[in-house]
Each structure stands twice: as C-alpha cells, then as structure tokens.
Image (tube, rainbow, N blue to C red):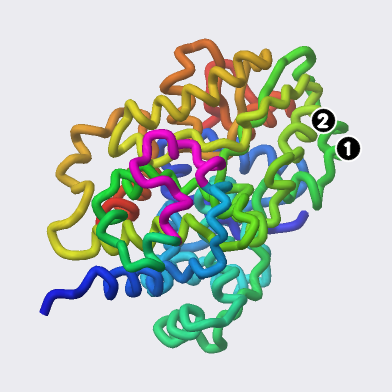
C-alpha cells in the first residue's frame, strides 16, 4: 500500500516533535538561517507545507542537506516552533529507508584529511544516514 | 580540591589532544580536578532531535548515571559533547516517553531522572573559580593580544536548555580573555555557525560559511580566535589561510598560566 503524501506529512510532524501549528509565517527563522540563501525551500515554509500535507516538496528539496543544525532558527523563533526539529523530521524521514542515505562510510577516505576531527564524521553519519 | 566526573569525548583523545591536555593541566593549577569517567562512550556528536530516538541518547545517559554514582558534577570541555549530554539530561529531567523507555532499557537500580549537574569547563571557570582568582594566577599575561572569542552554536543554543550564557550577547570567553590580560575583540559573527558537519558532505559550501566568520573577525581586528569546539576550529582554520590563528581556549589559558612549554604540547 502506498502511503499518501498527506499521511507522510503527518508522520513527519509527529516524528519532529515540534508544534507546527504555532507558526505564524513571520520568516524570522529564514532570516536567522546562515544557509537559507542557497535553500530551494526556505525554513519558514516547512511548517506550512507539512500542515498542508505537502511533504514531497520538502523531501525533494536541497534544504534538508544544507541545514547545519546550528539552532539559530529555533533560538530566534518568537513562537517556540523549533523549526530545526521540523527540518530534522524531514531529513530523518528521507534517510531512514534502506538505501536512501545521503552519505556512506565508503566515502570517508575521500573526504577525510589529517586534521578532520572524529566529531565531523560522527555528526555526518548521524545526520545523513540511519 | 573539587573533583569533577570528566567526559573527554572521542575527538579530545585524538585530533584535539591539546584541548584535553591543557584543560587537565589548567584545572590542577586552578584548584579543581578532572576525573575521567570509566568506560565512557562516544556522545554521538549531534543531539538526536527526532521524537522517537532513544538508542543514540543512551551513551549520554550512561555517562550521566556514572557521574551520579560518583556524586559529582559532570564536566565536559568539547562543545559538542557538552551540547549532547546537557540536552539528553534535560530529556531525562522532563521525564517523558524517552526518559521512561531509556530507564527501562538501561535498568539502573534507581531510575535516572536528570539528577546530575552538567557543567562546561568555562562555566566552572566563571561560576566556581571566578575570573579574579584566575587573574591572580596569570604568569604570562597576554598583554596587547587581540583575541576574538568564537562561541559557535552548540554552547549557546537552544538557550532554554543550554543556559550557558546570553545566547545573543555572550561574555564568558571575553571575560576570561580579559582576566588573562588579553585585549578581547567582540565581533558580530562570533555566535554564527562555522559550517559544521557539512564539511563532510560539501567542503566548499562549509568553507563559504566559515569564511564569513573569518572575514568578519578580520574586519574587526581579530588576530587570534579561540573556540571550545574541534569542528569549529577545523572549519575556521581551513579557511583562515594563516591570516588568523585559531586556537582552543585551553591553549590560550595554558599560555597565560605559564604552562605552555616551547615546542607545543606538554605530554
């Protein structure tokens, strides 16, 4: 049985643990985001797209790979929506199915250098795959 | 001498040895000691935000429980370890579904409910030792050195949980630098992201983010940056191109306290 986009959106909202209903689309999250300029879906659109059952737009976006989890959006949200959790919810939904990882341990030798901290690889493996 | 349960973390055992070593040496000089937790495990580097994630939080809970058994506060130096452990501790304190399931899985004699106090090394310097006491121990003041404090993200945000400093206008590092005799330089990008783990996925994009921080620091006359995060240091150093030295705050502290010998690390 295929899962409808509306159902996927609902599952992502639940997975995120954030309360998207509080969002007033003020855009402060996007203003705070250091990489919003390169995102094809800006942070302030996550809440409304998920509430309107349009998760596919977000799952296809580059935004979930550009997000740095720097928490600037969540810190500066005047409504306490915690947009970083919404982005994380979409990202997790994208990487959890088998074979859908954005990064693989096989790529480590290509990216690592003598100074790269263990922390970087650990974080990437947690963020880009499951 | 107050003793802390110490969670060093993986990076401090490897690529960021100087962050660990100077932290230990400076602590002894300033009158507290770091007792490394037995059999600690990697914190996971990033806080697992999804509402159903329990397994990636267990290593933090184990560390917190060990510290509770010792009756000690849990201290970290690495900004990432501190971030993860502090937020997981908050989850355990809130006592929701995650705390309940983590406790049932781990099966401690008494449930862990966030009893351990999680402190970052800088908080101990500020709140327990005090900058006046530190100033009194300085042997080689950093007179005239224009040092910029780079906070990054993880120590400050989300401020409701981290409660580390004012998230938009932090001061602990500048106050420390001033106590060491340096000339702290505040620059606007000191609490903006360095590019983080993105360097693994797209080094060029991460470099772009880091470069904004370095350019802003240069514009404000910073000659050296200090940080508590190995990944921030890595990203910033990569793009600094020798224009700005990027150090751990513990290196600068050790320098001022006269603990740094010629030729680098004091093994």
The chain ID associated with circle 1 is B
Residue at the (28%, 75%) spot, across then down:
A7
> Does A39 appear in magenta?
yes
Residue A27 visible here:
yes
Residue at the (33%, 55%) spot, across then down:
A126
Q: On the picture, is B177 further left or further right than B190?
A: right
Check the image and report above or below for B214 versus B34.
above
Which quadrant is home to the C terminus of chain A?
bottom left
The chain ID associated with circle 2 is B
Task: Identify the residue position indicated by label 2 in the image.
Answer: B179
Which x, y percent locates residue B52?
38, 74
Q: Residues in magenta?
A: A30-47
Residue at the (86%, 39%) spot, across then down:
B133
Which x, y percent locates residue B114?
61, 74
Q: CA distance from mark 2 to mark 1?
A: 7 Å
Secondary structure of the residue carrying tag 1 is: helix
Which quadrant is home to the N terminus of chain A?
bottom left
> Does label 2 or label 1 sit earlier along the sequence?
1
Secondary structure of the residue carrying tag 2 is: helix
Q: On the picture, is B56 further left or further right than A32?
A: left
Task: Identify the residue position indicated by label 1 in the image.
Answer: B132
Residue at the (53%, 39%) spot, across then down:
B229
Check the image and report above or below for B125 versus A78.
above
Viewer-closest of B184 and A61: A61
Kindly indicate the quadrant of the structure image that contains residue A93: bottom left
- The mark total stands at 2
Tags 2 and 1 both on a single chain? yes
Viewer-closest of B111 and B57: B57
Which x, y percent locates residue A91?
32, 57
Which x, y percent locates residue A104?
19, 48
Q: What numbered label is drawn on residue B184?
A: none
- Tag 2–tag 1 contact (CB < 8 Å): yes
């Amino acid at each position: 049985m295929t899962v409808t986009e509306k159902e996927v959106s609902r599952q992502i909202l639940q997975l995120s643990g954030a309360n998207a209903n509080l969002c007033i689309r003020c855009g402060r999250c996007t203003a705070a985001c250091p990489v919003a300029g390169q995102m094809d879906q800006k942070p302030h659109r996550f809440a409304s797209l998920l509430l309107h059952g349009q998760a596919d737009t977000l799952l296809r976006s580059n935004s979930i790979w550009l997000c740095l989890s720097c928490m600037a959006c969540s810190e500066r949200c005047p409504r306490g929506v915690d947009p970083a959790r919404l982005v994380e919810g979409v990202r997790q939904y994208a990487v959890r199915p088998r074979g859908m990882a954005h990064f693989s341990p096989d790529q480590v030798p290509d990216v690592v250098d003598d100074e790269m901290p263990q922390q970087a690889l650990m974080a990437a493996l947690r963020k880009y795959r499951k | 001498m107050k003793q802390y349960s110490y969670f060093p973390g993986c990076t401090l055992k490897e690529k960021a040895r100087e962050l660990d070593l100077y932290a230990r040496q400076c602590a002894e000089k300033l009158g507290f000691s770091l007792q490394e937790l037995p059999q600690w495990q990697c914190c996971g580097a990033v806080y697992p935000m999804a509402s159903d994630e329990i397994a990636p939080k267990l290593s933090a809970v184990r560390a917190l429980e060990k510290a509770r058994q010792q009756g000690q506060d849990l201290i970290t130096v690495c900004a990432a370890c501190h971030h993860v452990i502090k937020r997981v501790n908050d989850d355990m304190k809130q006592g929701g579904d995650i705390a309940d399931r983590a406790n049932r899985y781990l099966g401690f004699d008494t449930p862990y409910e966030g009893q351990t106090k999680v402190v970052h090394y800088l908080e101990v310097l500020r709140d327990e030792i005090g900058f006046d006491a530190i100033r009194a121990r300085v042997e080689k003041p950093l007179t005239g050195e224009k040092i910029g404090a780079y906070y990054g993200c993880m120590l400050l945000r989300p401020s409701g949980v981290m409660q580390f400093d004012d998230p938009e206008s932090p001061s602990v590092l500048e106050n420390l630098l001033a106590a060491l005799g340096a000339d702290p330089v505040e620059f606007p990008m000191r609490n903006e992201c360095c590019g983080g783990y993105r360097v693994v996925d797209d080094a060029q994009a991460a470099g772009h983010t880091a470069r904004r921080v370095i350019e802003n620091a240069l514009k404000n006359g910073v000659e050296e940056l200090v940080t508590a995060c190995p990944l921030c240091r890595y990203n910033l150093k990569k793009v600094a191109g020798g224009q700005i030295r990027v150090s751990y705050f513990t290196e600068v502290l050790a320098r001022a306290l006269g603990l740094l010998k010629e030729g680098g690390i004091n093994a």
